[in-house]
Image: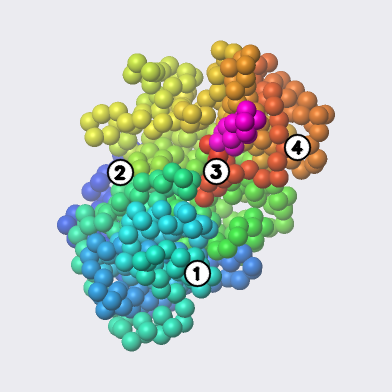
């Protein structure tokens, strides 16, 4: 029987994609399955084949083999057993991509413990909230973060240094995992503020199987690809789509460690001969803004992005320098990926700015407030059929005549001014076309006359001025509508972003509210 990995066309995806076909890609079954075995152990054949390439921000390259990760994860699993860790215990780790990171991730999963990756840039409040929530038995971190971690009372902190690996070296380099497919493998925290803890999404080992729909049709991963994902594996995109999905297929993946640098990323993409990359929209935008795209040779056959739409100016840069259409894939940590553009499918037309069409087996609609289906071009709420009913994604969208979906912003990113309804995303995308604008965040702010007006926070490549403000306002209203432009422009050196790299409009709104409250007092 032909495996799903051997099909590449959109037509074949609709005809052959099935749950049964996904399970055929794995050694495990609906009763017994282990992510560490599927992603690492079964590919560790003694050949030294690379599993992960790590581009360090300071310039070093690190290559980890399936054999090396498998042996280290087994020793760590035995070490956990010796430290009285039992199935269901949480093992947190706050590490950059490195051998200790992958050893902890897969070693804990083998024992039946639950891996909890933590973002390395968490401050004390963010870390404490998550530790209090998941209550890990151990937190593994690096020497630089050890003092921060130890400030949390009652938390056992272990530093991933030479002494830990020396202690682990006495244990065997193989381990037989015994986990059920429905056992919890990982807690994944979504990005959010330290004042508002996002819920931990609890993923079972069988989540890896359902993930493969996104891998096959959202990122287009196939055996033989040279893959790269610069998103941090502490977050959903970097962990599930950038790490577990390619490794499950035996595909070498790549990642970035340290402070992000777009030029360093492009050098790695060139040096590693990367043919397939999945990144955040911000990564592509930062590559464009570096103006260094012409300094490298790229080898892409497939590109994808997630997190938010890419502005048209950046899409044009991708077409010019990367020479492959950037394919959106849409989803959330909670619902998974549900809209894709089928990278690598020659019979699928990628429409710039589109979220694409549903993953095989998924049903989505754009609906009005009364639950009726919107006409093509009409903006409504994006709804997903799940569990016998319609589930709100809390995003606004529209479709075209051919059934492609388009993102129109979060429900709370709609700005209503003097009766006009405007999209923050649409205004941002237009302003980003201006040569002076590097980054832009748009929100609505209170106004006595109009109820609300548009305010734009702009990171410019020159000094802000009244003349530039007027130019940006004219530029925007001429391309959108006479009422659709920022009445207020504030020039800033940087924009607040969530850990996934998206502009944090809620923080912009909070900042404005605090300024307004201070002015009253």
**Residue with the most extreme bottom position:** 170
- For the residues labelled 4 and 2, the Cα–Cα distance comes to 44 Å
Q: Quadrant of the C terminus?
A: top right
Q: Position of residue 97 (x, y in %)?
A: 49, 65
Callout 2 environment at 10 Å: few (<14), some (14 to 19), or many (20+)? some
Check residue 42 for magenta coloring: no
Q: Earlier in the sequence, mark 4 or mark 3?
A: 4
- For the residues labelled 2 and 1, the Cα–Cα distance comes to 49 Å
Which residue in the protein does label 3 denote?
502
- Identify the secondary structure beneath mark 3: loop
Callout 3 environment at 10 Å: few (<14), some (14 to 19), or many (20+)? some
In depth, the one of 357 and 457 nearer the eye is 457
Q: Are marks 2 and 1 in contact (CB under 8 Å)?
A: no
- For the residues labelled 4 and 3, the Cα–Cα distance comes to 21 Å
Callout 1 environment at 10 Å: few (<14), some (14 to 19), or many (20+)? few
Per the rendered image, the range of residues in magenta is 509-521
Which of label 4 and label 1 is nearer to you? 1
Which residue in the protein does label 1 denote?
147
Q: Position of residue 509 (x, y in %)?
A: 56, 33
Which residue in the protein does label 2 denote?
17
Q: Earlier in the sequence, mark 4 or mark 1?
A: 1
Q: Earlier in the sequence, mark 3 or mark 2?
A: 2
Predominant secondary structure, magenta span: helix
The residue sitting at 19% across, 60% down in the picture is: 180
Q: Quadrant of residue 359?
A: top left
Q: Quadrant of residue 41?
A: bottom left
The residue sitting at 27% across, 64% down in the picture is: 89
Q: Earlier in the sequence, mark 4 or mark 2?
A: 2
- Image vertical order of residue 129 relative to residue 153, above or below: above
């Amino acid at each position: 029987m032909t495996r799903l990995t051997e099909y590449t066309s959109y037509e074949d995806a609709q005809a052959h994609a099935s749950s049964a076909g996904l399970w055929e890609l794995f050694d495990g079954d609906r009763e017994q399955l282990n992510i560490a075995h599927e992603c690492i152990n079964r590919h560790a054949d003694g050949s030294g084949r690379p599993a992960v390439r790590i581009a360090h921000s300071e310039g070093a390259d690190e290559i980890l083999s399936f054999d090396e990760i498998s042996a280290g994860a087994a020793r760590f699993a035995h070490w956990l057993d010796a430290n009285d860790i039992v199935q269901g215990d949480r093992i947190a780790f706050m590490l950059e991509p490195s051998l200790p990171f992958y050893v902890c991730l897969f070693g804990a999963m083998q024992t039946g413990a639950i891996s909890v990756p933590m973002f390395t840039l968490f401050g004390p409040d963010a870390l404490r909230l998550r530790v209090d929530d998941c209550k890990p038995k151990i937190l593994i971190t690096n020497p630089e973060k050890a003092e921060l971690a130890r400030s949390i009372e009652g938390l056992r902190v272990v530093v991933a240094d030479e002494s830990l690996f020396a202690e682990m070296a006495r244990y065997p380099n193989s381990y037989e995992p015994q986990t059920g497919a429905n056992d919890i493998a990982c807690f994944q925290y979504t990005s959010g503020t330290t004042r508002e803890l996002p819920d931990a999404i609890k993923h079972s080992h069988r989540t890896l199987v359902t993930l493969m729909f996104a891998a096959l049709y959202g990122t287009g991963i196939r055996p033989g690809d040279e893959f790269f994902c610069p998103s941090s594996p502490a977050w959903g995109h970097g962990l599930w789509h950038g790490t577990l999905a390619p490794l499950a297929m035996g595909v070498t993946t790549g990642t970035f460690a340290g402070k992000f640098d777009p030029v360093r990323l492009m050098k790695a993409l060139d040096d590693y001969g990367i043919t397939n990359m999945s990144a955040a929209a911000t990564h592509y935008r930062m590559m464009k803004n570096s103006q260094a795209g012409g300094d490298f040779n790229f080898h892409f056959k497939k590109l994808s992005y997630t997190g938010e739409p890419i502005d048209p100016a950046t899409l044009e840069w991708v077409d010019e320098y990367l020479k492959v259409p950037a394919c959106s894939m849409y989803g959330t940590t909670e619902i998974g990926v549900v809209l894709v553009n089928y990278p690598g499918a020659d019979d699928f037309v990628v429409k710039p700015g589109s979220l694409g069409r549903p993953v095989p087996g998924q049903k989505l609609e754009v609906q009005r407030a009364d639950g009726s289906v919107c006409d093509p071009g009409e903006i409504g709420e994006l709804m997903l059929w799940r569990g016998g009913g319609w589930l709100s994604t809390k995003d606004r969208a529209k479709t075209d005549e051919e059934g492609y979906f388009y993102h129109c912003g979060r429900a709370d990113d709609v700005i209503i001014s003097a009766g006009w309804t405007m999209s923050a995303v649409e205004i941002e995308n237009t302003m980003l076309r201006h040569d002076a604008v590097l980054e832009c965040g748009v929100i609505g702010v209170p106004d006595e006359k109009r109820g609300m007006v548009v305010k734009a926070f702009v990171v410019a490549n020159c000094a802000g001025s009244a003349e530039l403000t007027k130019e940006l306002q004219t530029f925007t209203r001429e391309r959108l509508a006479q009422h659709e432009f920022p009445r207020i422009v504030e020039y800033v050196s940087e924009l607040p972003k969530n850990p996934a790299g998206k502009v944090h409009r809620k923080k912009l709104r909070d900042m404005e509210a605090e300024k307004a409250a201070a002015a009253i007092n």
